[in-house]
Amino acid sequence: MTLIKHCGARAVMWGELDQMRTPPATATWFPLSHSQVLGSVVQTLDQAGFQIRSMELAVTPDDARFFGALPTAWPVQPSLRRSRRRPMGPFSGSPS
């Protein structure tokens, strides 16, 4: 699986996600950092027995949108997509 970056997105490492600012919470929205979301997905996959073989991570130029490909040894190849803007869904799985 290869993560295709476009519209100015750039490849990043997990540690770089830790350095990105998370917007402040509002009365109706409590944003999580990209790093927190990635950590939760990795932990959930691990607990379910999926061994992640590699990670390809990317963010848009403004760091607001995050994408990741997390290939496993199983037929399901998880991908991650999230935004600090609310309209984007957080996780999807796709067949290899």
Image (cartoon, grey):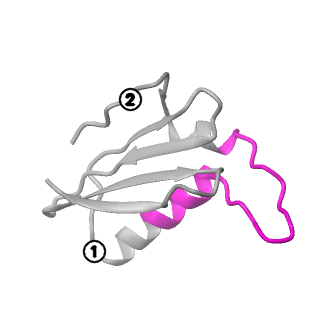
Q: From mark 2 to mark 1, how far is it between C-alphas?
A: 28 Å
Q: Quadrant of residue 91?
A: bottom left
**Left or right of residue 6, residue 15 in this image:** right
Q: Nearer the viewer, mark 2 or mark 1?
A: 2
Q: Which residue is mark 1?
A: 49
* Picture residue at 59% right of the left edge, 26% below the top: 61
Mark 1, Cα crowd under 10 Å, few <14 / some 14-19 / many 20+, is few
Q: Quadrant of residue 65?
A: top right
**Left or right of residue 73, residue 31 in this image:** right
Examine the structure image and report whether residue 24 is included in the region drawn in magenta.
Answer: yes
Disc 2 to disc 1: CB gap under 8 Å? no
Amino acid on which the number 2 mark rests in the picture = Lys
Q: Looking at the picture, does residue 90 appear above or below residue 23?
A: below
Tell me residue 3's x, y (percent): 31, 37
* Picture residue at 15% right of the left edge, 64% below the top: 74
Amino acid on which the number 1 mark rests in the picture = Gly
Q: Which residue is mark 2?
A: 5
* Picture residue at 52% right of the left edge, 52% below the top: 82
Q: Looking at the picture, does residue 66 appear above or below residue 25?
A: above
- Counting the numbered discs, the total is 2
Q: Looking at the picture, does residue 47 appear above or below residue 19?
A: below
What span is colored magenta in the figure? Answer: 18-42
